[in-house]
Amino acid sequence: MTGIRNETQQRAMYVATAIDQALKNYKFRNQFLRFNDRNSPMREEEFNSIIRNAIYTALHADATYNESAASKMYVDTLKTLIPRWWAPAELLESLPRKSKKESEKQSNG
């Protein structure tokens, strides 16, 4: 995990890994359950549910890291699974970014 610049990027990579693992687990489970059948395509609602549940699980585990051994193990394991070849997370174009001058102008008055 090289090039991570801030904590938010690190958390994004952690959550992305949770999603990646959940999708891989889904794919593996379906291949096992339908060993001789053709794989049916994932429905959009299934896809959205897997992503939503992975995000919630990752955030919950992170929030309860110090209170739960299971959460600690989950977080620590996921952090080791973040692929080193992944580029750092970047903001989507749909979120306008303020220039440094605009940010300084707002904070100064």
Image (cartoon, rainbow, N blue to C red):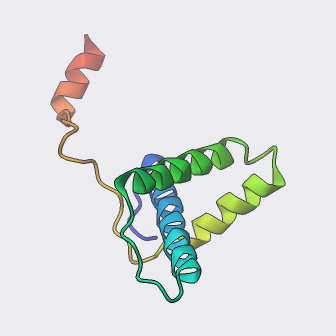
Q: In screen coordinates, is 109 left or right of 42?
A: left
Q: Residue, x 48% and y 60% (percent of image)? A: 19
Q: In screen coordinates, is 104 left or right of 78?
A: left
Image coordinates of residue 71 in percent, x first then y, are 74, 53
**Residue 66 makes an appearance in the image:** yes
Viewer-proximal residue among 50 and 84: 50
Image coordinates of residue 72 in percent, x first then y, are 75, 56
Viewer-proximal residue among 32 and 81: 32
Residue at the top extreme? Answer: 109
Q: Residue, x 52% and y 69% (percent of image)? A: 26
Residue at the front extreme? Answer: 37
The mark total stands at 0
Q: Residue, x 49% and y 74% (percent of image)? A: 27
**Residue 11 makes an appearance in the image:** no
Viewer-proximal residue among 2 and 50: 50
Image coordinates of residue 101 in percent, x first then y, are 17, 29
Residue at the bottom extreme? Answer: 36
Quarter of the image where one finds residue 84: bottom left
Q: Residue, x 48% and y 50% (percent of image)? A: 49
Image coordinates of residue 41 in percent, x first then y, are 36, 69
Where 50 falls versus 24 (above or below)?
Answer: above
Where 20 falls versus 56 (above or below)?
Answer: below
Q: In screen coordinates, is 33 left or right of 98?
A: right
Q: Quadrant of the C terminus?
A: top left
Quarter of the image where one finds residue 44: bottom left
